[in-house]
Image (spheres, rainbow, N blue to C red):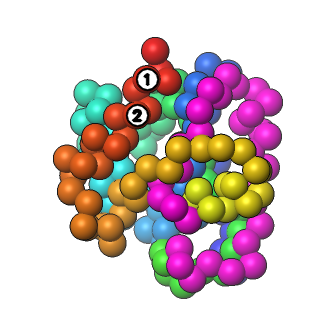
Amino acid sequence: MVVHEIAPIFDKNSKVLILGTMPSPKSRQAAFYYMHPQNRFWRVLGAILEEGFSVSNEQKRNILLKRRIALWDVLKSCDIDGASDASIKNEVPNDLNIIFSSSKIDQVFTTGRTAEKFYKKYFRKECIALYSPSAANCAISFERLCEDYSQILEFLK
């Protein structure tokens, strides 16, 4: 059983919520999101937002807040083998109302189909599923990821 212990990133001005499924072992170890060195999340966001995300975690957090992006995961706990979303069992959702009740979220995005599946199962709301930025999803090119994640920009205006 793995318990999510990384705080959500959001504030009252957040307009877009990006949800993963559950932090990877590398992310849990670093106590921050998308920390596996081959995960392309920060590079993709950096490219579409024209921001430098090769910075400290605190700077990443500040850039997200400045750009009105909230970040968290759908699940609070689950049984999981390593970072394999396909192995998830006995999942318990996070209380996303923490974010919805104190921000201005207009759109929810998920970083992959598994996060989408759990979001729809527990919250019964629509979301836009983006491609997973995981290195395991190497069939999707960096350019295609950037194109897909560019959907976020229309909700940040």
- Residue 154 is marked as 1
Residue located at (53% from left, 73% from top): 85
Position of 98 compared to 51: left or right? right
| Residue 91 vertical position relative to residue 43 in the rendered view, above or below | below
The quarter of the displayed image where residue 141 is located? bottom left
Q: Position of residue 37 (x, y in %)?
A: 29, 62
The quarter of the displayed image where residue 57 is located? top left
Tell me, yes or no, if residue 31 can be seen here: no
Q: Say whether residue 78 is magenta.
A: no
* Residue count near mark 1 (Cα–Cα under 10 Å), binned few <14, some 14–19, many ≥20: few
* Residue count near mark 2 (Cα–Cα under 10 Å), binned few <14, some 14–19, many ≥20: some
Residue located at (72% from left, 45% from top): 125
Position of 98 compared to 108: left or right? right
Q: Amino acid at mark 2?
A: Gln
Q: Are discs 1 and 2 less than 8 Å apart at CB?
A: yes
Residue located at (65% from left, 44% from top): 126
Q: Which residue is mark 2?
A: 151
Q: Position of residue 138 (x, y in %)?
A: 25, 67
**First to last magenta residue range:** 85-114
| Residue 81 vertical position relative to residue 83 in the rendered view, above or below | below
